Each structure stands twice: as C-alpha cells, then as structure tokens.
Amino acid sequence: MAVGKSVIGHQLAQQLGVPFVDTDAVIVEHHGTIADIFVGRGEHAFREIEARTVGRVIEEAAGSGAVISLGGGAVLDSGTQQILAGCTVVYLECDAATVAERIARNTGRPLLAGDGMARWEALFAARRPVYERLADITVDVRSGTVAEIALHLEERLRDHAALKEEVQK
Ligand SMILES: Nc1ncnc2c1ncn2[C@@H]1O[C@H](COP(=O)(O)OP(=O)(O)OP(=O)(O)O)[C@@H](O)[C@H]1O
Ligand SMILES: O=C(O)C1=C[C@@H](O)[C@@H](O)[C@H](O)C1
Ligand SMILES: [Mg+2]
C-alpha cells in the first residue's frame, strides 16, 4: 500500500497512450468507499467484489495494452493469480521508510487502521513472496520521482516485450 501503483500506473498509461484503469477506483464507483465496504460488509465481501472487478476489468481491457493498477491485496486471490498469468505483471518494490510519511497521512486504507506502519510491515512480509512470484518485472520505487520511475518502467516493458518476442520466434 502507498508504493505508487495508482500514480505511476496513470503516468505510464499517459506515456504509452493507452487506457488506465485503477481497480480500487472502479470498486468505489460501483460500491462506495473501501472503508465503508470493510465496515458495512467486511473484508471477505470486499475481496469477493475485488476479485470480480479485477476479472471483469482485465477481460474488458484484453488486447488494448491498458495499464491496470490493482489493490495491494488483490493478487492473493487464486483466481486472480490465474488470470494474471496472461498479463505482464509489474511489482513496485518498496520499503517501510519510503511509505512512512504517506501512511502517516493515511486515509481510506482500513487495513492500516491503528499502528499503520506495523500493519504495513506485517502485510508486506506476508505478501512479499506472492508479489515476487507473480512479477514479470520488478521496479525499485524507493527513489526517483513518479515521472522518472514511469520512464524507467516503460523501458523495462519494452525490453520484456522484445525478449518475449525473441523467445517465441
Ligand atoms: N516516487 C514517488 N515520489 C513521491 N511521491 C510518490 C511517489 N510514488 C507515490 N507517491 C505519492 O504517494 C502517495 C501514494 O501513491 P499511490 O496512491 O499511487 O499509491 P498506491 O500504491 O496506489 O496506494 P494504495 O495501496 O492505497 O492503492 C500519493 O500521494 C503519491 O503521489
Ligand atoms: O493492500 C490491501 O489489502 C488493500 C489495498 C488498497 O489498494 C485497497 O484495495 C484496500 O484498502 C486493501
Ligand atoms: Mg492505489
């Protein structure tokens, strides 16, 4: 959480001239705020909504080259993991020190309620192996502006696509 998925994803999509979709934003548009869903219906219901939303968004974006930003916990769902096998998955690798200030002014992230930093670190430790396993490309986002990171990511995506094409020949 707070590593820059939404802002870097948006910037990358602008550079590439492709659509950008943030699945958290789609959920909010259709179901109300994430905080309200957690309070009113619980995390399990949120995860069901999230998995359905991610599946639909990826299906609708097929062939468009769209950049899709997922919520930080979306990739824990096994169905989502299967769908992501057909996508290029980018993992934005970060650390607690980098997100500390962003989390301190945290709003709307129910899983970071209370001691936000301790919660962030515990979630990251538990999820890190999944992020690493699913990633096609890993980008260090501990330094650099959003613009710099997005440009670097564009380069990495081009290298990845070229390599994939080479292998498929
Ligand atoms: N490289 C960066 N340099 C400076 N600020 C950044 C950088 N990356 C992200 N931010 C800022 O950090 C905050 C969180 O970014 P963003 O909302 O994109 O994170 P996220 O990973 O989408 O978080 P969430 O898990 O809540 O969806 C924003 O205020 C954003 O502008
Ligand atoms: O990491 C998570 O589990 C979450 C991240 C956010 O993007 C939202 O999807 C929600 O707050 C849950
Ligand atoms: Mg986001």
Image (cartoon, rainbow, N blue to C red):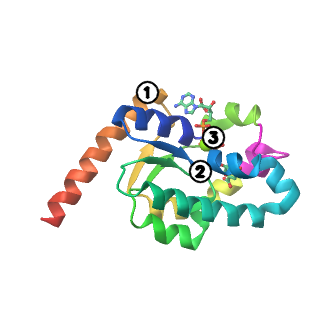
Magenta segment boundaries in residue numbering: 107-120
SS under mark 2: helix
Q: As displayed, is residue 167 above or below residue 70?
A: below
Q: Does 14 appear above or below 115?
A: above
Q: What is the CA distance from the residue labelled 2 to the residue labelled 3?
A: 15 Å
Q: Disc 3 beta carbon < 8 A from ligand 1?
A: yes
Q: Nearer the viewer, residue 74 or 62?
A: 62
Q: Which mark is residue 2?
A: 3
User: Which residue lies under the disc numbered 1?
Assistant: 147
Instruction: Give x and y (percent) for residue 59.
Output: 47, 62
Q: SS at mark 3?
A: loop
Q: Earlier in the sequence, mark 3 or mark 1?
A: 3
Between the residue at mark 1 and the residue at mark 2, the CA separation in whole angstroms equals: 22 Å
Q: What label does residue 169 carry, if any?
A: none
Q: Is the residue indicated by label 2 positioned so its CB lies within 8 Å of ligand 2?
A: yes
Q: Amino acid at mark 1?
A: Ala
**Which mark is drawn over residue 23?**
2
Residue depicted at 74% across the width and 52% down the height: 31
Q: Quadrant of the C terminus?
A: bottom left
